[in-house]
Amino acid sequence: MAEVVERNIEDSLSEYSYIRRAKLFNEEEIREIVRRRRQHEYSLQKRNKRISDYESYIATELGILRLISLRRLKTMDFRFKDKLEKSVISRLVRLHKQICYRFQSRVDVWMRFLLFNRKLGRHLTVARLWERVLQVHGRTDPRLWSAAAAFHLTDGARAKALSALNKLRTEKQALKKSRKKLAQLMKNPTCSQEKAVLRLETLQLTKLRDAISRQVRLTWDRTLISGLREARRILVQGLRLNEDSVFLVVELLKLEASATDFFQKRVLSRQKQAASVDADDRTDAETFMAEVSEDVDVVASGGTFNLVLERFLTLPKCTSVDIASVIKIATKFSFANKALVDQLSDRQKQLEAEEIAEKENIEKAISETMCDKAATIASTNALLEGRLNDLQHLLEAEGVDAALSAWTTWYPTGVRCELLQVLDPSSNPRWLALLTFRLQLVNVSKMQKPEFNGDVEEAVRAYNEYRLKHEERVKEARKLMDTLAVSNWGSKVGDFWRLYMEFERKLGDCSRLPSLKWRAEKTLRDAPRAKFLADCTDANAKEFL
């Protein structure tokens, strides 16, 4: 571990020398940077990798990069940018690659790496990253396919066009200088021959400017049609993995609308220029049309758009809202098939009727379920109240043993105990009242101590029997509470644990109170745990026994 860390630290030694030469940080700040980087490197070498370690390291490096730029503005020293910034950026790229490799299932990790490369202007890297993201998360979220297609259609196409146009930059600058020099000479020609020569040169420069303009337009047309093809390929590939995705079909419909508009405005004009008299226009048009592999007439007439539009007639997971959005898109374009739009309107009405009927059926089923549930709750309440009254009557008439016998008959200990099958004991306070009465029986039996009648031996024997009987009842009650503690009682009812702790404090073993409180904090859910802790610290909280 230490060798890997020190090797990574040593790789950045040249960076610190350039920092000293540029006087961006003092020695104390450099030592702090080294200390933090060493600390982060050690955290990355742990056996159990954590995403927070990588994120904190990345945040530190971004802070250093930002601080370097601020110090450069302060000192106006912009030397060694290819050494300092490049070193930090390469480290950030390494960290992003590691985190994407180790946590491939996290989409947000890939998105951060994509955004980082996009800010750096590395469009080729972004394109490769999108391919990798779609390989890993092709079925995770259809929006990823749409985002990748949008990148190739906008940022990717723009980057390709600008990269190709950079080659014409020197020609544009030379042409600009020549035109400026020629304009100065045209102001004061020395003779008519020089004036004629200058006019010829002006004509040549105009032709050269027109040629560069044609090349610029041709470059943009090429990159745009390439972006359309790449975006179409990505969306079609996404539909192969997500066949019933309405979202991707809608995105493909929008793309085909853009393609139809582009073919009508740009490609058809190029096709007409192929028969032009001008040789330059004809050559450019023929060169461009040789690269067009699509059927121009079909795409320009809206054939592909209507083909995608027709798919919504049979798409199984469409809703009336989806069809309405599709109709809204189709009505914006004149090349949309009116018959298809009418069929989609009919399907929208049909889906609306089906959705309304389904909603009514669901509401009816919910109302029936609520009625059944209300009847069940009423019967449960009546049953619990009846059992509470029966226990109270048995306790007053026949004593504790009869009440405990009735309890055992109703709720026998075991897996099929009715108390264990209660889904949410906190929803009905009668459950807790019934359990409280069960523990109260132990408290009542404790108070029924044998009377002293003058015979010491008889009194000792009677007390021993009383003590053993009480301990047995405490054990039975504790066994019941431990059984309920691992059920919904222990996770949803905070008062259950307070009742258990009060039982141990008054009737059982006080030494078990810390362990019971620890079990309650570990077992209870968030909301019941907060209420339990608040009640434990409240001096005015009610007591159960």
Image (cartoon, rainbow, N blue to C red):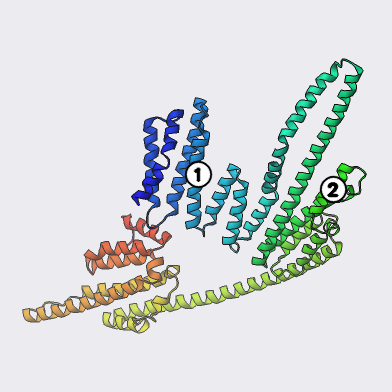
Q: Quadrant of residue 341?
A: bottom right
Residue at far front of view: 193
* Front residue (pair 291, 294): 291
Label 1 to label 2: alpha-carbon separation: 44 Å
> Which residue is located at x 35 percent, y 49 percent?
3
Q: Amino acid at mark 2?
A: Ala
Secondary structure state at the residue bearing disc 2: helix
Instruction: Describe residue 161's horizontal placement relative to residue 480 as left or right.
Output: right
Q: Is residue 69 visible?
A: yes
Q: Which mark is residue 384?
A: none
Quadrant of the image for the C terminus? Answer: bottom left
| Rendering coords of residue 316 (x, y %) | 71, 70
In the foreground, 173 or 345: 173
Which of the two labelled residues, at mark 1 and mark 2, occupies the earlier sequence position? 1
Which residue is rendered at x = 87% and y = 15% of the image? 190
Q: Is residue 75 left or right of residue 125?
A: left
Q: Which residue is mark 1?
A: 90
Give x and y (percent) for residue 173.
Answer: 73, 30
Circle 1 residues within 10 Å: few <14, some 14–19, many ≥20: few
Q: Is residue 22 above or below residue 332?
A: above
- Farthest residue, direction right: 277
Mark 1, secondary structure of its residue:
helix
- Quadrant position of residue 293: bottom right
Residue at 90% across, 23% down: 196
The answer to whether the residue labelled 1 contacts the one labelled 2, judged by CB atoms less than 8 Å apart, is no
Task: Quickly name the residue at label 2.
Answer: 285
Image check: 121 left or right of 165?
left
Residue 399 shows in this picture: no
The quadrant in which residue 169 appears is top right
Q: Position of residue 481 (x, y in %)?
A: 32, 72
Against 483, is 194 above or below? above
